[in-house]
Image (tube, helix red, strand yellow):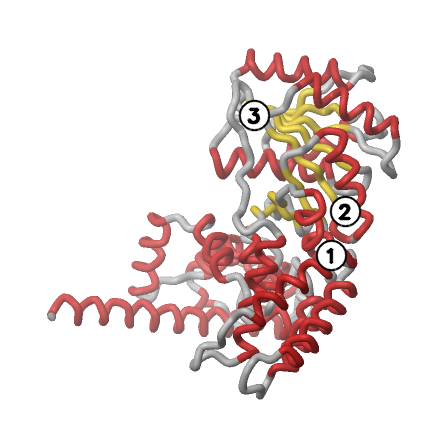
Amino acid sequence: MFENLSDRLERSFKILKGEGKITEVNVAETVKEIRRALLDADVSYKVAKEFCDRVKTQALGTGVLTAVKPQQMMVKIVHDELAAFMGSEHSEINVKGSPAVVLVAGLNGSGKTTFSGKLALHIKSKRGMKVLLAACDTFRPAAIEQLKTLGAQVGVEVYSQDGEKDPVKVAKDAIQYARQQGYSVVIVDTAGRLTVDQELMAEISTLHKAVNPTETLFVVDAMTGQDAVESAKAFNQAIDYDGVVLTKMDGDTRGGAALSIKAVTGKPIKFVSSGEKMEALDIFYPARVADRILGMGDVVSLVEKAQEQYDEKEARALKKKIAHNQFTLNDFYNQIQQVQKMGSMKDLAGMLPGMDKALKDVDIPDDAFKPTEAIIRSMTPYEKEHPECLNGSRRSRIAKGSGTSVADVNKLLKQFEQTRKMMKMAVDGSLQQRLKAFRR
């Protein structure tokens, strides 16, 4: 995410490296490089110019503290302006109502229907609300079946009417059904087109007026750059939506849409979607995204993702097992499952400061743990609980059963032993610190 922009901005800051103070000359050179970086990231010239003018004004109007180098000060100024351009504070989705109605709009291929499924899971799991998906895309063949498949994956009911071509009727009937069945939120998946046209704008405008949604979200493919910004403007004129959703962020290395949409439409980005997993939906935090663009990582989001998978009762039980050296391959397997639920491996690693650059040319597939899972699943219950019994013949059988080699099995068991020792040391160290604190 934003790899090219991050690299270009880093190069622009090097102009100030070694400089004793900020001057009009070195600021002008730096800002010139920043403008080039933004244009290369597919940010419109008008937005890039406005951004750079604000950075220049801030830089020349800021006295550099004795302990802060000019390069560091420029990084801070650019960070703050990036966050401001993208909306400063994150914007919550409005799901108040009886039921709340969320209208999802966008062009075909933007990931609109997939996002509807992801949003249903997000509201259901994060807010504990009962959600109904309304299949109102009566234009695209198989759209209803796609939504039903996604609904089944996330455990959310999908309301549809076979043969009905009027999306307004389907939407109204879905809302009425939701009231009768006690649903808290109705997510209306609408039809799109390949391009913005009068027919689409008229249809979405009519549907919007008919259902009077509490929240309207425009879904846009981040990889389309300035085309995304233009379609965002057109849809905003038709339905005056409440927020933007950027999809396919895992494939966008430039980031022009994320930097331009708020400045052009005045509407906040509320969600970003990256990856095919239904859990791969994140609330958009401008300051955190600015951190990642400037190579500072996003440790806060990483901790939040970990906390979502954290069960305090299970953690206490696991800590007790580790302390008594009873950590097994079953526990190891469960920890892997929890890590995978947090999202893409490369995306998670990229949240650590400096790792985006380090992993730029490294491919970390989402199925990286599959061989490990296959090996553990090929073991008997006794072997998982007593890995010390795994002799040569057992390891050979496990390798054949998992489609791996004996060397792979040996490597996994070595990693498991190293992990067990490290966790034991960490727990023992924590207990000793608590004991010392108690004695004091």
Q: Tag on residue 123?
A: none
330 left or right, relative to 240: left
Between disc 1 and disc 2, whose residue precedes?
A: 2
Q: Is residue 322 visible?
A: yes
365 left or right, relative to 234: left
Identified by mark 2, the residue type is Val
Task: Identify the image quadrant of residue 439.
Answer: bottom left
Residue where numbered disc 2 is placed: 229
- Residue sitting at 74 percent across and 13 percent down? 169
**Mark 2 or mark 3: which is in front?**
2
Determine the residue located farthest toward the left in the rendered image.
439
Kindly state the secondary structure of the residue where label 2 is placed.
helix
3 left or right, relative to 429: right
- Residue sitting at 39 percent across and 62 percent down? 327
- The reply to whether callout 1 and callout 2 are in contact (CB within 8 Å) is yes
- Residue sitting at 35 percent across and 49 percent down? 312
Callout 1: 10 Å neighbours few (<14), some, many (20+)? many
Decide which of 121, 393 is in the foreground and name it: 121
Between disc 3 and disc 1, whose residue precedes?
A: 3
Task: Identify the image quadrant of residue 67.
Answer: bottom left
Q: Quadrant of the N terminus?
A: bottom right
Identified by mark 3, the residue type is Val
Identified by mark 1, the residue type is Gly
Kindly state the secondary structure of the residue where label 1 is placed.
helix
Residue where numbered disc 3 is placed: 185
Residue where numbered disc 1 is placed: 256
Query: Residue 415, percent across and down?
Result: 51, 72
**3D distance between C-alphas at marks 1 and 2:** 9 Å
